[in-house]
Amino acid sequence: MKRDSIDFKDTDIGKLFRKLLLPTVLGMIFSALFVITDGIFVGKGIGSDALAAVNIVSPLWLFSTGIGLMFGVGASVVASIHLSHDKVKAARINITQSVVISSLVLMCTSTLFCVNAPQVVKLLGASERLAPLAIEYMLWFVPFSAFTALLNSGMFFLRLDGSPNFAMMCNVVAALLNIALDYLFIFPFGWGMFGAAFASAIGTTVGALMIVAYLARRRCALRFYLVKLSNKSLRLTARNVGYMCRLGSSAFLCEVAIACMMFVGNQVFIRYLHEEGVAAFSIACYFFPIIFMVYNAIAQSAQPIISYNYGLHETERMRRTYLLALRTAVSCGACFALITVFCSHDIVAMFIDRSYPAYTIAAKGLPYYATGFVFFAINIVSIGYFQSVERARYATFITLLRGFILLTICFYGLPLLIGKTGLWLATPLSEALTTLFILVIYIRNKRKRQKI
């Protein structure tokens, strides 16, 4: 739990960004392994229907992740600004409020989801064939949603406190534990969907408890602070939580947007390509959050630098950080796209056997899907920048545009225009149109600055 020395004010931007980026990306890579291995073990050990069933209930996992990111981003931006003004106590109060309120919210929603499990999976688009598998997975993972949120929000607090390496270790331990237990529960024990869900729940819980242990230490600058329960304190908590939610709302909506992509995609794929199409689409859906994790790691590495210097009105350092993050994300996006295009058959074979009809559908579709990866990179880093400088309206509108409005229009409209290929091109087109909109915002703001 060694705390590193990080000077957000004076350290060279490139050096500072690299110091945060390496452990953050490594942590996210292990989180990606968490997701990938879950899909591989479910697909290979249980079958393509099980893979499709997990994809049906994935929006619930993304909901809890989104709550964690919303409170993590919001509290981290506010705490960064407080720390730049030497208001350490206020920063501690902010992170405590975010952890407590997010946990309470998810305990309530998880109970609601589990009590109404059959109705929930039906609402998410499960067919009669997939519903039993989806319910089984859901009932053993959703109750641990509060730990999923804490694992995601805690990353922000540990990095801001100068411990990006320990933040990485929380993700590494959670992922490795999930991989080991996934194999043990699915293959030797033969526990099926219950085993897959329970392995993920245990890994997430252990990683989250590591964060709790860190934030409970008295020698940390950022740690839990005992908040009073007086009327005045509760009013201040409500105000602070409202502001944090507003700042982090676009982070929540980014996750909900992925859930929306899965939900709408499942509906459209099952209409055109039946259960086999949903299984094929689920492989793409395993890829999308993984790529999002890497882009998000880049945005998260830039966030404390931008927010801290925003509090000091250091505009040039903010701009340089954003451009460095953007170049890094675009380079990663280009690499992801090329790998997916040239290795689509090998990627699909990792998840399901070649004998399944879903294999052929996915192998043909993934190269089309990959054409949006670079645009996705630009959008996520830009949204992260607007969050970091308290421009919540921009961040929220862009997220709504790319993840809901354009995505839904493209999913339902493109197949009517160009056939089944349009199913795979819907997400890339919505990302490309969003990038165009961000470019329009950039040009307009630049012209405003030139007039001043």
Image (tube, grey):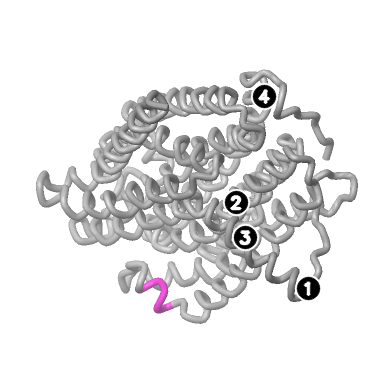
- Specify which label sits upstream in the sequence, 2 or 1: 2
Q: Measure the alpha-carbon separation of dots 2 and 4.
A: 22 Å
Q: Which mark is residue 74?
A: 2
Residue 428 rendering spot, x and y as whole percentages: 29, 39
* Label 2–label 4 contact, CB within 8 A: no
Q: Measure the alpha-carbon separation of dots 1 and 3.
A: 32 Å
Check residue 384 for magenta coloring.
Answer: no
Is residue 405 rendered to the left or right of residue 210? left
Under mark 3, the amino acid is Ala
| Bounds of the magenta segment | 118-122
SS state under label 2? helix
The residue at 40%/78% (across/down) is: 119
**Which circle, 1 or 4, is nearer the viewer?**
1
- Residue at which label 1 appears: 229
Under mark 2, the amino acid is Gly
SS state under label 1? loop
SS state under label 4? helix
Under mark 4, the amino acid is Leu
Q: Measure the alpha-carbon separation of dots 1 and 4.
A: 39 Å
Residue 10 rendering spot, x and y as whole percentages: 72, 22
Counting every numbered tag in the picture gives: 4
Q: Which mark is residue 16?
A: 4
Residue 94 rendering spot, x and y as whole percentages: 71, 55
